[in-house]
Amino acid sequence: MSPVVLGCDHAGYELKETIKGYLDTLGCEVADFGTHSEASVDYPDFGSRVARSIDKGEYDRAILICGTGLGMSMVANRFAGVRGALCNDLFSAIMSRRHNDANILIMGGRVIGSELAREIVRTWLETPFEGGRHHQRLEKFCAF
């Protein structure tokens, strides 16, 4: 598996650091695009940097975190090759992979706790894309 790219704003910093440590315990290599403190920053700067790396094919999977996950979702999904999914529960994480082949997991650092976030990350990384009829739908979606 290629490295998992991480990005966040100040509101997602604490959870990003937790997830980074968790990914290390799973043996996943991490590329941390910041931010690197709780000092106030603009989420589009970090969300676009991560999304662009996915869009260009430099990385296969990424995780973005801001306060609610909404801002990062809006930024990430502006890139043609990105299928970013805001998942603050396990069912959404599973379905985002099975049916939508999501390549960026987005979470709200002020919405969920660290234990649930770790479970969402593990589930999202382990869940495969089902393909089949879902592949045909993605082809239509990616044609926009």
Image: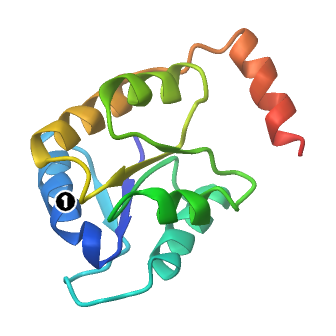
Image vertical order of residue 88 relative to residue 76, above or below: above
Q: Which is nearer the eye, 51 or 107?
A: 107
- Looking at the image, residue 79 sits to the left or right of residue 127; the answer is right
Give the structural element (helix, strand or loop) at label 1.
helix
- Looking at the image, residue 100 sits to the left or right of residue 140; the answer is left
Residue 59 location (% of width, % of height) = 51, 54
Q: Measuring 48% from the left and 58% from the top, which residue is drawn there? A: 70
Disc 1 crowd rating (10 Å Cα; few below 14, some 14-19, many 20+) is many
Q: Please state which amino acid type lies under the numbered disc 1.
A: Leu
Residue 5 location (% of width, % of height) = 40, 59
Query: What residue is pinned by disc 1?
Result: 15
Q: Which is nearer the eye, 53 or 77?
A: 77
Name the image quarter holding residue 75.
bottom right
Q: Which is nearer the eye, 70 or 32?
A: 70
Residue 66 location (% of width, % of height) = 35, 65
Q: Measuring 66% from the left and 58% from the top, which residue is drawn there? A: 55
Q: Measuring 32% from the left and 32% from the top, which residue is drawn there? A: 89
Quadrant showing the N terminus: top left
Residue 91 location (% of width, % of height) = 38, 22
